[in-house]
Amino acid sequence: MNQLSDRINNLATSATLAMAAKARELRAEGKDIIGLSLGEPDFNTPDFIKDAAIEAINQNYNSYTPVDGYVELKEAIINKFKRDNNLSYTLPQVVVSTGAKQSLANIASVMLNTGDEVILPCPYWVSYSDIVKLSDGVPVEVQTSIENDFKMTAEQLEAAITPKTKMIWYSSPCNPSGSVYSKAELRALADVLQKYPNIYVVSDEIYEHINFVGGHFSMAEFDDMYDRTITVNGVSKAFAMTGWRIGYIGAPDWIARACNKMQGQITSGANCIAQRAVITALEAEPSSIKYMVDEFKERRKLILGLLNDIEGFKTNEPEGAFYVFPNISAYFGKTIKGKTINNASDFSLFLLEEALVATVTGEAFGNPDCIRISYAASQDNIIEAVSRIKAALS
């Protein structure tokens, strides 16, 4: 008899983590799986950051940390916001969490009541929808198209707003599409929101520095949106620190205080050694990680060239992050090697079993016509993976 809560029974498993687990199982069986499913840089954490962590250990940082983060780290975050984003925050407006995912969960918990609607431009990061549902909110998906680089227009936003709309969540650069909203595109969305002063925005900027067009813009930079925007960021992607688990927000102080209160009852403060290392990471100039961004740009060019050589793959050129999000709906309804492809989930599973390449179905991101392919892998692995995909589909 299942005595688990309805909450957990109704919760979806993270599709990216599920695919990674499936790939690990197949590897354990001796299969040579190439993983292009996880959003994880394949670089090592830079040595100057690791040295800072070792120094913190030697300095005996081992006690509980303040719930919202060390003051020195919050000051580094404030300086980073000013330097990189032209945003001015004060200490009470910043909360450090165990990864940006916890930051998002905190925001949902303190902002949403039962039935509150959250607009999610599709595709959206895999966990947004379920984080909203866990706080009894209602995700409202707004479909975008590859022709528009998967970006929500002002007209689409206006059409999605109802009296129950409480928030909008989006990422730029976007996971999974790699799309980057320009200042003009964000201004158009902000102009719509001027008519609805009670709607708040979560701007997820975790991929901020992995940007191939330059000119990252934050919604909170608009004076008329600053008090309604929660800026979420972290160090996982830009600094190759996924396992260090440090994320943070800049927000109106009343929201930040609420997140601090919530976190105090769930996890308390984030890891002490990781926090000390992140101070050093954020104090460094963004140019210190340019070598990673340059390599991702090379890989983007490589993978797009290879995928465009496969009939049935429709791609656009993502402007940031390290993903491509091709439309593969041309394969729906076809039977290949005895397996019928009805949707993106079937297609992704087919690639895993037949090509031994792990990708993620677009259904997990709110777009059932696409799959997400991460190019946070070596160029050799990218070449081999796409070669296998092409062979399996031919």
Image (cartoon, grey):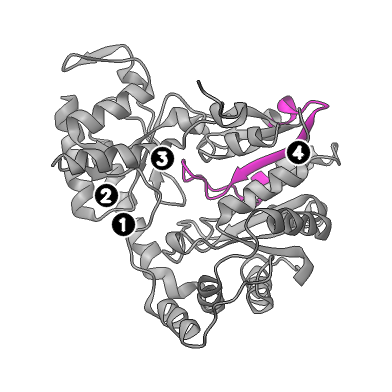
Q: In screen coordinates, is 318 left or right of 107?
A: left
The residues bearing labels 2 and 4 have C-alpha atoms spaced at a distance of 42 Å
Residue 310 seen in the figure: no
In this view, the mark in front (1 or 3): 3
Q: Are marks 1 and 2 in contact (CB under 8 Å)?
A: yes
Disc sitting over residue 302 in the figure: 2
Instruction: Kindly state the secondary structure of the residue where label 3 is placed.
Output: helix
Q: In screen coordinates, is 127 left or right of 139?
A: left
Judging by the rendered image, the residue that carries numbered circle 3 is: 16
Instruction: Kindly state the secondary structure of the residue where label 1 is placed.
Output: helix
Instruction: Kindly state the secondary structure of the residue where label 2 is placed.
Output: helix
Q: Amino acid at mark 4?
A: Leu
Which quadrant does the C terminus fall into? Answer: top left
In this view, the mark in front (1 or 4): 4
Q: In screen coordinates, is 106 left or right of 228?
A: left
Q: Residues within 10 Å of mark 2 (few under 14, many from 20)?
A: some
Q: Amino acid at mark 1?
A: Glu
Q: Are marks 2 and 3 in contact (CB under 8 Å)?
A: no
Mark sitting earlier along the chain (2/3): 3
Q: In the image, residue 259 lies at what x, y percent?
A: 73, 55
The residues bearing labels 3 and 4 have C-alpha atoms spaced at a distance of 25 Å
Question: Which portion, as a residue range, is magenta?
Answer: 157-186
Mark sitting earlier along the chain (3/4): 3
Magenta stretch holds residue 389: no
Disc sitting over residue 242 in the figure: none
Judging by the rendered image, the residue that carries numbered circle 4 is: 112
The residues bearing labels 2 and 3 have C-alpha atoms spaced at a distance of 23 Å
Instruction: Kindly state the secondary structure of the residue where label 4 is placed.
Output: loop
Image quarter for residue 194? top right
